[in-house]
Amino acid sequence: MKKSFKNISLSIATIFGLYTSPVSAQRVNPVGMRYVGSQQYMGQNTQIVNPNQQRTLYVAPQINSVYAKPMNRVSEIPLYGKNKSTYFYGQKKKDDGLFSDNGLYMFAAYSTGKTTGGINLEHGEVNSGEADANDSMGTASGLTLGVGRVMSNTLSVEFMYSKYNKMKFGDWVKFNSTEEQEKLDENGDPIEDDKGNIETEETSVIDDSTYEVTEGGQIDSNFIGLGFKYNLENLFGTILGRLKPYIGFQIGIAQNTIKDYIVNDDEGYTDGDEIPEADDDEALGELKPLDIYTAEEYSNGELNFIGATTRSFAVGAELGFSIELEGNLSIDIFYKINNYGKVKTSGTVLSTYDVDTTEFYIVDNEEVLDTNTDPGENPCGDGFNGTYDPDAAYTLCTSDAETEEGIQTLTERRVSSGDMNFRQYGIKLKYMF
């Protein structure tokens, strides 16, 4: 009996000791769904009594605890790469932009280089033409904006807009004029008509005089096109460890514009009939007596050449190196050849001159003058001046010049044109989305 009582007492003491031990302070709850961070796990929760504050209880999940069953992950499988930010269940995906990971990039480029041709007269019998000394349109500066997409590790496609300016017609011009020249046959001999007279023709020649362009003549070009860029790194590797070679070409439409330009012609020119010298009987004899002729002298001239805009098919070729920078930036250094078609003037020239008009005729001294009468110093009628020379065959009678200021003349079909070809060096900054 005593032994049974002793065993019962020992059992009670053991149970009481376990109940009052620190381990007994943890009360195991049934297994359920719990969160660690934003992840769900299956396991046990334990209420832990803070020894310093007996009245405060808090719940802590037991992870890999000897007091809890093994925990099982029940949410999605961990992700890597661009979606690694979604590792935790229910967490919002990181927003890298609308075009993130699509291979898109934007770029801006600046380039500069000389043109390789000037503007010349397009119509006429001479090839050199109106501005034969202007062999260049100057230095062209270009600004390009565009977007591109990486199609593969070697090929990229770009859409771009470029504007080139700082070009001009030139500082001075030459004019072509016409001269009467004898017609020549195949052997170089003069051609005669049925009456035995040598036939002549008007031939266009270059005037040796030059005329300064006082204002205007600026040229610019706007290009819209599609470009293709091919990376040569797989073929040639990198240069100096960082420079990645590439080639590219562009096709599109260029809109080339030349603005009006003004040329001064102070000396001017003469038109109409040529007034012969008073003592040149041979030249006077070619005129009919008493028929009135007119000579016009143009001076203080200003010529306004009207510009125009021309659209042309355009191509370009590019060779360069790419340098990767920190982040999503890179730089291209390139050499480029552009052929953007032609730039042309409208062909219309508005000329403004002061015009002095003089009328003249001749008197046959033998037939008209009364030999019994002294004609005096002026044998001509009212409004005309002339000096009688009894030893001369003719008397030249001229009127006082009538001056009209600012007479405008419109000339058509004087188109001047030039090829828009230039070689450029440039730098391009790219940003990858």
Image (spheres, helix red, strand yellow):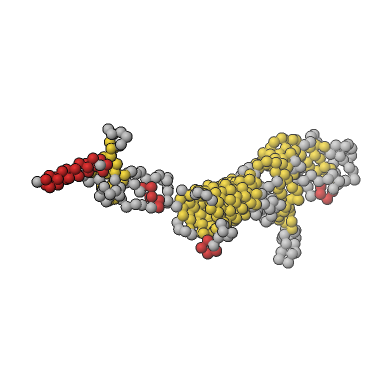
Question: Among all residues in the image, which is located at the extreme bottom?
Answer: 187
Q: Residue at x 29, y 45 (%)?
A: 62
Q: Residue 102 in the image: x percent, y percent?
A: 42, 51
Residue occupying the point 54% across, 49% down: 429
Q: Residue furthest front?
A: 2
Q: Position of residue 81 (x, y in %)?
A: 40, 52
Q: Is residue 64 above or below residue 196?
A: above
Most foreground residue, 372 or 412:
412
| Residue depicted at x 11% and y 45% | 2
Between residue 201 and residue 250, name the one nearer to us: 250
Q: Position of residue 231 (x, y in %)?
A: 51, 59
Residue 169: tell me if it is visible.
Answer: yes
Residue at the limit of the structure toward the left, as seen here: 1
- Total marks placed: 0
Is residue 292 at least partly visible in the picture? no
Left/right placement of residue 226 relative to residue 274 reads left
Left or right: where 4 falls relative to 274:
left
Picture coordinates of residue 263 (x, y %)? 70, 43
Closer to us: 201 or 326: 326
Residue shown at 88%/46% (left/top)?
392
